[in-house]
Image (tube, coloured by chain):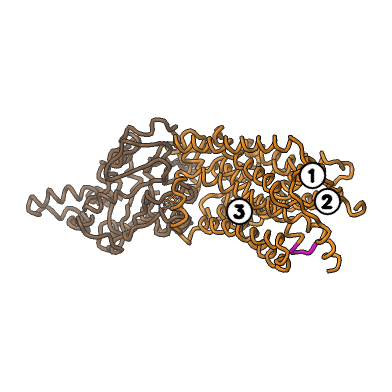
Chain colours: A brown, B orange
């Protein structure tokens, strides 16, 4: 178990470490057994087209997700301009405000074990949101990222009814304070984009980058050599609601 | 065949004109309620849905209850026409035209409410040009539009003499279409696999039975009102037949409701949501037992069936109660089904800032109610207006023995 944790930590810091290591001449690269750090960086090189060669995913270690920590949620808000990351949604009630990612506290009533985990769009391979969407606004990129095309979303909210994870939010009022890269709008539905705008520039999602505890690992599920794939191959992990057979891109370990 | 021809010939249809001021007054009130419905929709769209009781947990609120109520009522209202031309029951034939008209008007009212509750109703064109054929919602949009076309043709075969030979064929097409339409509407919920309240194939037949019952009740009310306000003869034979039919349909609905809940109780995973609806003491429990079962089914069935109730007022009361029961049923299914939390990890208790693991709260707001009522008012207004300009209603529906 301790080894799992070590590796998570390294993978998480991979990007920054890689840059640092590179400047050190790459000498200190072999930190963890089984992981080569220059693979751990594993985001998409900037400017490359989106293809089905990649399938981006996350692995979340609930044992590392700290009680009371909200860093990933805060980072998402700042990055994507919702919640505290925007001055909008002043009129909406709490139950009407958008939440792209949330911390869920879990308790096993039998053993009384407690743990936390971030929950966001699980980027299903067979997404129910997309099956039901009348206009095709709910769509999936070639690389497995699920998104809403805000130009053709009619705000019917059927995708919200269909999503098993409550990953989607409806915008209940007019907005003005938004990020240029992340347009949002009244009457449309939105959700986690796995920071596609960052991924397309070769960066990792804001939540993953912000996690101080190494609880989140981002990478390419299609590449058997990627840290996330090697990790998934070596430790037990689960999908939320695996009974629905959605083959989610977000996996959890330690549940 | 002989008697059928004779019957058809005998029925004289006439536009409704022999009424007093009260008819106009009712039209005016309905027009006002329709107008207020539009204003309410504008208010909600202009501000955004924050002015409603809906939220990110209860995403389909009261307008959806009204819309789906009207849509399934539309399919049920056509029942009377079907019985006449598809099953060849001559006694029902004179009732066919009004039945078709009412069906179309109810459907338009329901679709109107559905569209005006969209987050972006201004993108209606988008909805009609971008189709995701995998979506049951898309299929429903096509089914609804098609329904208007098929029933429209069916009506024309009743109006245009030389088309009369096609009435049965068109009626059969409309009859089949209507079943598919209600099945499709029920399937909107059946497809939501993750929600425990909906994951059941029985919802489609349940919706069909409920639609027949509600549609017949609305038909009776409209029929009685038109005849009363115009002083035309409406015999007890016709009404007794209709109310008996409605009683049977209400019992059939209750049967499917029982099957729905019993099969769900059999599935251990669904115990939670069933307990929540049936015994938890929530608003949905009351709506179910009081609204749907007692007032919405048992009382009207007694009113329709028992020989001790013979007058028109007992039929009116029964029909209103059937409508109340149908509405309660849809409220319980649509809102109650969303209020019960989804399982994120089975067997675990979950909490979060996004209300995971909690019963979702929902208080319908006034604009939502006004929009829904506007849809109902529009449907009735359109029906009552069209019978004034086109001959939809038989001159007389007096008992055969008297005629
Ligand atoms: S988690 Fe929900 S919103 Fe995300 S892809 Fe799956 S069904 Fe769609
Ligand atoms: S709300 Fe938008 S994205 Fe969701 S199903 Fe409707 S049109 Fe599609």
Chain where mark 2 sits: B
Q: Which residues are magenta?
A: B85-89
Q: Is disc 2 placed on a helix, strand or loop?
A: loop
The numbered dot on residue B267 is 3
**Pair 1/3: label in front:** 1
Of residues A156 and B358, the one drawn nearer to the viewer in this rendering: A156
Residue A163 in view in this figure:
no
Tell me which residue sits at (56%, 52%) in the image.
B189
Disc 1 crowd rating (10 Å Cα; few below 14, some 14-19, many 20+) is some
Mark 1 and mark 3 residues within 8 Å of each other at the beta carbon = no
Mark 2 / mark 3, whichever is N-terminal: 3
Label 2 near label 1: C-beta < 8 Å?
yes
Mark 2, Cα crowd under 10 Å, few <14 / some 14-19 / many 20+, is many
Relative to A126, A227 lies left or right: left
| Residue B101 falls left or right of residue B140 | right
Q: Which residue is mark 1?
A: B227
Q: Which mark is residue B397?
A: 2
Q: CA distance from mark 1 to mark 2?
A: 9 Å
- Which one is in front, B194 or A48? A48
Label 1 marks a residue whose chain is B
Residue B98: % across, % down: 72, 52
On residue A34, the disc is none
Q: Secondary structure at mark 3?
A: loop
| Occupied quadrant, residue B175 | bottom right
Q: CA distance from mark 1 to mark 3?
A: 50 Å
* C-alpha gap between disc 2 and disc 3: 50 Å
Considering only vertical position in the picture, is A32 above or below B24? below
């Amino acid at each position: 178990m301790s080894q799992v944790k070590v590796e998570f930590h390294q993978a998480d810091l991979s990007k920054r470490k890689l840059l640092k290591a590179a400047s050190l001449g790459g000498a200190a690269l072999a930190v963890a057994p089984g992981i080569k750090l220059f693979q751990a960086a594993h985001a998409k090189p900037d400017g490359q087209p989106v293809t089905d060669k990649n399938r981006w995913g996350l692995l979340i270690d609930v044992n590392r997700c700290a009680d009371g920590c909200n860093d990933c949620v805060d980072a998402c808000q700042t990055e994507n301009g919702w919640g505290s990351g925007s001055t909008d949604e002043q009129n909406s009630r709490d139950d009407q405000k958008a939440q792209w990612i949330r911390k869920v506290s879990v308790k096993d009533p039998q053993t009384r074990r407690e743990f936390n985990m971030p929950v966001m769009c699980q980027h299903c391979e067979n997404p129910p949101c997309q099956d039901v969407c009348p206009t095709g606004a709910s769509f999936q990129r070639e690389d497995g990222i699920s998104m809403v095309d805000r130009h053709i979303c009619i705000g019917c909210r059927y995708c919200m009814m269909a999503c098993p994870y409550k990953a989607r939010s409806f915008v209940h009022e007019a907005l003005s304070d938004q990020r240029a890269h992340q347009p949002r709008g009244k009457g449309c539905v939105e959700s986690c984009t796995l920071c596609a705008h960052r991924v397309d520039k070769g960066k990792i999602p804001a939540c993953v980058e912000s996690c101080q505890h190494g609880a989140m690992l981002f990478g390419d599920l299609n590449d058997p050599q990627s840290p996330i794939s090697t990790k998934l191959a070596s430790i037990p992990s689960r999908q939320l609601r695996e009974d629905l057979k959605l083959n989610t891109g977000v996996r959890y370990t330690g549940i | 065949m002989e008697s059928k021809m004779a019957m058809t010939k005998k029925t004289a249809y006439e536009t409704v004109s022999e009424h007093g001021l009260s008819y106009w007054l009712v039209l005016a009130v309905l027009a006002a309620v329709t107008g207020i419905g539009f204003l309410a929709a504008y208010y909600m769209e202009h501000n955004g849905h924050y002015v409603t009781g809906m939220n990110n947990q209860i995403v389909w609120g009261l307008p959806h209850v009204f819309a789906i109520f009207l849509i399934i009522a539309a399919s049920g209202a056509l029942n009377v026409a079907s019985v006449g031309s598809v099953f060849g029951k001559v006694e029902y034939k004179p009732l066919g035209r009004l039945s078709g008209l009412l069906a179309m008007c109810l459907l338009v009212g329901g679709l109107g409410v559905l569209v005006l509750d969209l987050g972006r109703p201004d993108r209606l064109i988008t909805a009609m040009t971008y189709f995701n054929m995998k979506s049951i919602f898309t299929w429903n949009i096509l089914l609804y539009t098609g329904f208007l076309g098929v029933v429209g043709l069916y009506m024309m075969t009743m109006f245009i003499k030389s088309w009369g030979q096609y009435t049965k064929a068109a009626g059969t097409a409309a009859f089949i279409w209507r079943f598919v339409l209600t099945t499709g509407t029920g399937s909107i919920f059946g497809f939501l696999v993750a929600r425990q309240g909906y994951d059941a194939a029985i919802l489609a037949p349940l919706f069909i039975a409920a639609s027949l019952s509600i549609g017949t009740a609305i038909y009776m009310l409209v029929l009685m009102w038109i005849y009363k306000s115009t002083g035309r003869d409406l015999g007890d034979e016709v009404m007794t037949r209709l109310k008996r039919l409605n009683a049977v349909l209400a019992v059939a609905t209750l049967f499917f409701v029982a099957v729905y809940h019993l099969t769900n109780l059999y599935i251990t995973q669904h115990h939670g949501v069933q307990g929540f609806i049936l015994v938890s003491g929530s608003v949905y429990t009351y709506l179910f037992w009081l609204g749907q079962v007692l007032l919405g089914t048992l009382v009207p069935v007694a009113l329709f069936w028992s020989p001790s109730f013979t007058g028109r007022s007992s039929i009116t009361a029964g029909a209103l109660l059937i409508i109340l029961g149908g509405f309660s049923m849809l409220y319980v299914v649509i809102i109650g089904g969303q209020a019960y939390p989804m399982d994120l990890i089975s067997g675990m208790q979950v909490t979060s800032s996004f209300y995971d693991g909690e019963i979702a709260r929902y208080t319908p707001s006034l604009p939502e109610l006004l929009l829904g009522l506007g849809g109902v008012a529009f449907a009735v207004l359109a029906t009552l207006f069209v019978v004034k300009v086109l001959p939809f209603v038989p001159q007389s529906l007096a008992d055969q023995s008297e005629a």
